[in-house]
Amino acid sequence: MKRLIVMMFALLMIGVSGWAQSKKQAKQKTPEQMAKQRSEVWAKEFDLSAEQKQQVYDLQVERFSRIKQKRNSELTKDERVQQNQAYRIEYREKVKTILTPEQYEKWQLKQENAKKKAAKKQKGNKASKKGESNNVSPEPVVDESAEVDVM
């Protein structure tokens, strides 16, 4: 009887781990899927024209493809930082050419707010690691539509 229970438990665990792995793989999106999602968000948020939406989609495909390539590369931290800085400048210039001045101003404001949120969250994480109390809620509210330049 014990053997039967142990065997059933082992089979259950094998099934659960296989299911979890397939679920994780299903969550991984292609650069095109991520770009489509991001361009939809931008279209609503910045009231983009059809042409602008296509340009944003193309820019985001390029951006997410670069991110994916970097994750698979063997660059040193300094090399990554240099590449990220250079690409950030290039990315901002491309965004500026796609958006109208009003849209670009709104985008910049959103970028600044996202930076502030990220800095506040990082500060909260550092304080909690040191054992200090902080005023950060246990589950911070994250604006998923907020864009953060990680590159």
Image: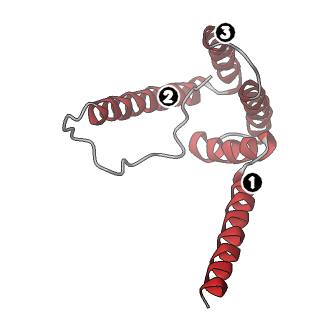
Residues packed near mark 3 inside 10 Å, few (<14), some (14 to 19) or many (20 plus): few
Q: Which residue is situated farthest in the left direction here?
A: 133
Q: Disc 2 marks which amino acid?
A: Gln
Q: Earlier in the sequence, mark 2 or mark 3?
A: 3
Residue at the image position 79 percent from the left and 31 percent from the top = 65
Disc sitting over residue 110 in the figure: none
- Kind of residue at badge 1: Gln
Nearer to me, 151 or 128: 128
**Would residue 77 appear left or right of 109 to someone viewing this image?**
right
Q: Nearest to the eye among marks 2 and 1: give it.
A: 1
| Residue to which mark 3 is pinned | 79
89 to the left or right of 137: right
- Where residue 48 appears, as percent x and y from the top left, is 67, 40
Q: CA distance from mark 2 to mark 3?
A: 24 Å
Which residue is denoted by mark 2 in the rendering?
111
- In space, the residues marked 3 and 1 are separated at their CA atoms by 29 Å
